[in-house]
Amino acid sequence: QETIKIGVTEPLTGPVAASGTYVTNGARIAADYINQNGGVLGKKLQLVIEDNKSNPREAVNSVEKLILKDKVPVLMGAWSSTFTLAIMPKLTEYGVPLVVETASSSKITTAGNPWVFRTSPTSAMEAQAFAKLIDGFSPAIKKVDFLSVNNDWGLGAAAEFKKMLEAKGITIGRTETMTPDMTDLSAQLAALKGTGSDTLIVTSGIEQLTLAIRQAGEQRLPQRIITTGGSFPEPLLKNPGPKGYASQHLLFFAPWAPERAKHPEVAKAFMDGWKARNLEFAGQTEGFRGFDAILTIAEAIRVAGKADSAAIRDALWKVQVKGANGDVAFSKEGPAGKESGQASPNVYVVELKDGKVSVK
Amino acid sequence: MTFLVCVLGLAILPLVWPDPYMLSVVASAGIFIIAAISLNLLLGFTGQLSLGHVAFFGLGAYTTSLLSLGFDVTLWGMSEPLVVDPKPVWLSFVCGIVFAAVAGWLLGKLAFRVRGAYFVIVTISFAQVMRMVALNWVDLTEGPMALNGIPALTLWVPGEGVIDLVTKASTYWLVLAVGVLSYLLVAAIVHSRVGRAMIALRENEVLARSVGIRVTHYLGIATIFAAGIAGAAGGLYAHTVRIIDPDVFMFMFTIMMVIMVIVGGKGTLAGPVVGGLLFGLLPEVLRGVVSPEIQWMIYGVLMIAVLVFMPKGVVPSAGNLLRRYSARAGKTPAPLARRKTA
Amino acid sequence: MNVLKLEDVTVRYGATTGVNRLSLEVHEGELVTLIGANGAGKSTTLRAINGLEPLAHGCIRMDGHVVSGASPAQIIDRGISHCPEGRRVFPQLTVRENLEMGAYRRIDRQRVRDDMERMFDKFPRLRERVQQVAGTLSGGEQQMLAIARALMSRPRLVMFDEPSLGLAPNIVEQIFSLIQEIRREGTTVLMVEQNAYAALAMCDRGYLLENGHIVSQGTSAEMRANPEIRRAYLGG
Amino acid sequence: MSTLNATPALELDGVTMRIAGLTAVDNASFAVPAGKIVSLIGPNGAGKTTTYNVISGYMKPTAGRIRLFGHDITGMAPEQISQLGLVRSFQRTSIFSACTVAENIRTALHLKGSCGVLQALLRTPRFRREEASLRHEADELMAFLGLSARADELASNLSYGEQRLLGVGLALAAKPKVLLLDEPAAGLNPSETESFKEMVRRIGQSGVTVLLVEHDMHMVMSISDHIVVLNYGRLIATGSPSEIQNDPEVIRAYLGSGIERAEA
Amino acid sequence: MQHTLNALVLGSTYALLGIGLTLIFGIMRVVNFAHGELYTLGAYVAYAVVGMFGMNFFGSLIVAAVAGMVVGAAIEYLLLRRRDLKAMDEVMLIMIGVMIIMQNAELLMWGGVAKSVPSPFGQEPVVLGAISVSPIRLFVLVTAAVLLVVFYMLIERSRLGLAMRATFQDKDAAKIVGVNVSHVYTLTFALGSCLASVAGALLAPVFVVTPTMGDLASLKAFAIVILGGLGNLKGAALGGFILALVEEFGAGYISTAYRDALGFLVILAVMIFRPQGLFTIKERVG
Ligand SMILES: Nc1ncnc2c1ncn2[C@@H]1O[C@H](COP(=O)(O)OP(=O)(O)OP(=O)(O)O)[C@@H](O)[C@H]1O
Ligand SMILES: Nc1ncnc2c1ncn2[C@@H]1O[C@H](COP(=O)(O)OP(=O)(O)OP(=O)(O)O)[C@@H](O)[C@H]1O
Ligand SMILES: [Mg+2]
Ligand SMILES: [Mg+2]
């Protein structure tokens, strides 16, 4: 055998294609990076990438193909919680481990599927990380509104952040939701305008974050805007909102300050690869997920000593990976005996004002 | 006759070519072919273009999933939550069909006054509202958090007891069985007085009423059966994918069904099956050949090409060709295309 | 001089033949009628002349020029107008708009308005209904509108396909005298009419179609005297 | 009229229909005695078709009542009314275009059948028997209409006259007790009209009550037992054919001098 | 107040989408699922022209208009000509094919990442007491109003508009009176596409540009055109504003979670009580 295959299923077409493509590019960079440094077990890594078309049925089909036709021993994917949950029965059926790089639903690791290892944080973890930074804000956060996309991620994040804020004695104001494809948020923002809160926590994808921040500026929303989930409203870099209007973003990777990463050399390797491929700068805030996930898988294969599914799974429990975000190591979650793996990443706060970014 | 041969051929496929990937792909397409067969009853025979067909698919899926998993929900005006224990899968599956059929009947009632483009928008709206409900009634449906751990359908096998239908071949046969049943059901309806009444509605509603055909009644029957079968397809989807979320109400799913029906040839019995096999399997054929965007573009181009060169769909055009060929060969005309429009 | 000449014209609808090797001619200023049983090919002939059906065989000439293959618009520009069977008014347009459509190829807008007034004088019923949507007119009102629309293009030759269809007896009379009137004013008329008696009485010449071709022709008197025609088409 | 004591097949009582500010039918009352052929005539736009629409349930009258064999049918749906035995044909040609002639007729025989979905699904013996008998009846009716040779032709491929004939055939297929015909002979030539007239007469003789709207005076005068004349929605005359022919108001509003030609 | 203004502004974007579709769907009866793709095309044209070549935004509107016209004409010429438009669903499917092709071509060319186009008026909102609105949105409002009037005149008052309406009511009869039917087909489709494209370019600075931005736009546009009654431009405009009002106030006073559902519920209600849309008359029987 010349190469070791890793299956990747990501949304490359359809509504969430942008993020899926970022992650896939991150994965490609990782594979190249490893191969340039001698590969794993003396063999080169080969990514087999399939499009899950932003659709759970296609996610299942793509995984069937990767496992049955390409015979990949390990998988990475599938971006959203729905797609991930849809393919999870297949993992048990065929006994193939999956490293989940993005999905945030708590169900993924609590469903009792021992083939699942998640590198991305749950919303609860993100909220806890944010809790540590909360006192750094001035003026202080006293009352918080929410604007969330109404999927598992947005609603889950709102719920976890509320829990955390309440524990800190902070008042919860109004909560508004939006469908992922909504472009005009004026009704939601108008409803939030008069709540008297000082902070608005927004959870959604890049497009909607951009629209929300811009339209909030247009409607002169008084709240300070904080976004969660690691997405960054990249279009605001080139076309900033109204002057003086600032927003803050919880990120897991901040390419504006790679030196602040726990392993700057790894972060730099990732960023170099990104640059070499001529990709959008801000996309690195999402792309690193694919990079770290592949590094993790490669490390597991090395520890396992062979490209065998069960061995890789056992090895995943032992890995200690230096990733772009920081250290990746898995702890157990879910019902005893059938635990899934969950890593705990680092969080950065980044401020965007007049098209300029500063890392806090 | 041809039909029996086809069914037998499909039935022994897993024995002669037990490639699990192929089987899973065909089964997955099969689920949508079943939905397309049901859509054809509405679109092809009553002439009502429903772009909300996925609503019934989703309702079937949610009903059977919720019943087989059990749920508790506080209804408006109730002090005690309503607790429903998990039910046997097959019972849930049947309930899913019934519930979808009831919803079909309801939509039939609701939409009985509108036709054409207006019917289209009513059905789209209905599906959208269903999706919003699934998304926002978190107490019941878990909303976007998805229902997972849905049990598989079971079968009692002599000697082995009750087994879960999870293997590729068993899923395949399960889908095939439901598919054949749906096909026969639609065929029986269409080739009857009831079917003629439906076609009359498609052709000229005013005239149909004047000869005593209660069009709303037959439109109702058509929607009930179409919705019920779509509900069965949804149930199969839920019990094979084993997780559902409001995405089962995706507009794209309706589009997929419509593609299968029209490309195959609406108003013909074999149309949705042929169209479904072609365009259900096409994505898998294209997978990995070129980049994903190009795969889609090829898909679109082929779709247009079929309709440009075979304006009525594959089955009627093939039927015409066959007839012309046999006419030239001096044989009796093949009854293929005829039978379909009867 | 013949305005219109059909030579060996064949029109096919897939496997069926609409008209088969049909030849006829219409002279300047004449009123010519086509009669024949249902499905004989009368309407098909008019549609072929109008450029609506492609010819499988044969040739159509106008003023000596070959016009087979020309588009309906070109045919109209040559001065032929067609009042089709089954009325074919534009159902969602008002009566006025339908008449405007009749003058679609004309550019003399002022004269168009005058002509419209003339049509209203001829069909007072239409004036009462100017703003009504044509689809809601009664059958006979629609027929009047179709006739008026055909005359709005100021044709040199006008083809009527069953103009009396669905009209009250007194209106039929009016229509027939209108047709004779426009003919007197110099317009050539080619008419398909089921009311064979009246049609043959007012025409100069007639043709009898059967199964897509001409089986008999002659002057008005000859046609009426033909015993076969009397038996088959005049009801005794 | 001599049928005063018997219940008329169809009876209109002060029927008024206003559409978009226009009174298309204005307080019309008349009766059609059972087993007779009655004609409804009047100038174009007089409201004849509208009257049909009201009778057959496509329009709800603004005022007035309609009775079928003494049974009030005002405001019922068309399909209910045809079930009660009143069927109409259409002035604008109405057929099932994409179906063959035979299929058209079999579809129109709907009321003759009774099998529902259940029988269809189970293919019961009764279902099979019924299908066979419908097929047979359709063949007979096509023979009656003279369309047997066209049985397998798509209806849209028929010529205009044949389509009109088929349209009447469809109404007949519904086995009416009262048949409303709206200009059935339009598009037929005199000899065809003649044989069509015979057909209507035979239909009348078979016990069907016929109400006829027709502009062919030759046919109307020779076939009708009784004539009703409408003008601007109002009843202006009723009577026997000879009475109507000589009614000055009818002549002025409708017949003109054309009556002579019709008689010729 | 803010809600009313928002509804007005949102309604104008809906109306803008509705005009083009009124031509293609309302008059031509083509269930044009590619309408949203032409909208997207316009937006990308604006992005390319403004963002990449640094041209003026208003110039980009013209480029978008031309691009929409050309692409629309090409689609009509290649795919719709000689087809029986009465076969509504087959034509619809062809347009779905076009949609799939165009959307993925955009994805291939531009990537899935959202692009944004700078507003020619800057980002500073216009503030009037408690309410504020961005100047570009006011511009959209005005443009929509102007286009509505222009196209109303075109469809209802001009000879061309008359020919368009006539042609799609009865193609054969239109031929008989001498309309060059194929020109009318091409022109109608091209104009409708052009409007969609202009709407996309116009709204590009308001929203962000992505390959899937047309999906929701299409659906909304359909709802609006049907709500107003097919082929009725006034109805479509009003339908747009009604939908916007319902969404805006429903979201403000009932629940944002059901904002979209409210819109669809209104459509359901209208269809139940006035099945032929708000502003059309029934056809006659017999
Ligand atoms: N569109 C069509 N497709 C197929 N066949 C057609 C079509 N139009 C006419 N025909 C056939 O062509 C033949 C001639 O038809 P045509 O309409 O010219 O007859 P006609 O003499 O006008 O009859 P009528 O008096 O009934 O109007 C008929 O046999 C008819 O069935
Ligand atoms: N839906 C409608 N909207 C407006 N006016 C209508 C409508 N239906 C009928 N009318 C008008 O009502 C009058 C009566 O129409 P109707 O069709 O009943 O006439 P008719 O007696 O059948 O005439 P014809 O002999 O010409 O068929 C006509 O003037 C017609 O324009
Ligand atoms: Mg004819
Ligand atoms: Mg009438």
Image: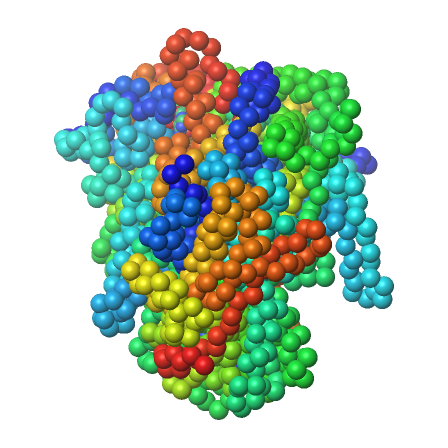
Residue A22 position within the rendered picture, expressed as x and y whole percent measured from the top left: 41, 59
- Front residue of B33/D207: it is B33
- Front residue of B215/A81: it is A81
Residue that extends furthest to the top in the rendered view of this protein: B330
Going 36% across and 80% down the picture, which residue do you hit? A356
| Snapshot quadrant of residue B46 | top right
Residue A131 position within the rendered picture, expressed as x and y whole percent measured from the top left: 59, 78
B305 relative position to B231: left or right: left
- Front residue of E206/A98: it is A98
Q: What colouring does the structure picture have?
A: rainbow
| Residue B324 visible within the image | yes
Residue that extends furthest to the right in the rendered view of this protein: B80
Going 41% across and 8% down the picture, which residue do you hit? B330
Going 39% across and 69% down the picture, which residue do you hit? A264
The total number of labels drawn is 0
Residue B131 position within the rendered picture, expressed as x and y whole percent measured from the top left: 61, 56
| Residue A80 visible within the image | no
Q: Quadrant of the N terminus of chain B?
A: top right
Q: Quadrant of the C terminus of chain B?
A: top right
Question: Does A268 sit above or below residue B162?
Answer: below
| Snapshot quadrant of residue E3 | bottom right
Question: Does C125 sit above or below residue A358?
Answer: above
Question: Does C181 sit above or below residue E267?
Answer: above
A260 relative position to C66: left or right: right
Question: Does E253 sit above or below residue B177?
Answer: below
Residue B269 position within the rendered picture, expressed as x and y whole percent measured from the top left: 56, 28
Ligand 1: quadrant of the figure: top left
Going 59% across and 69% down the picture, which residue do you hit? A125
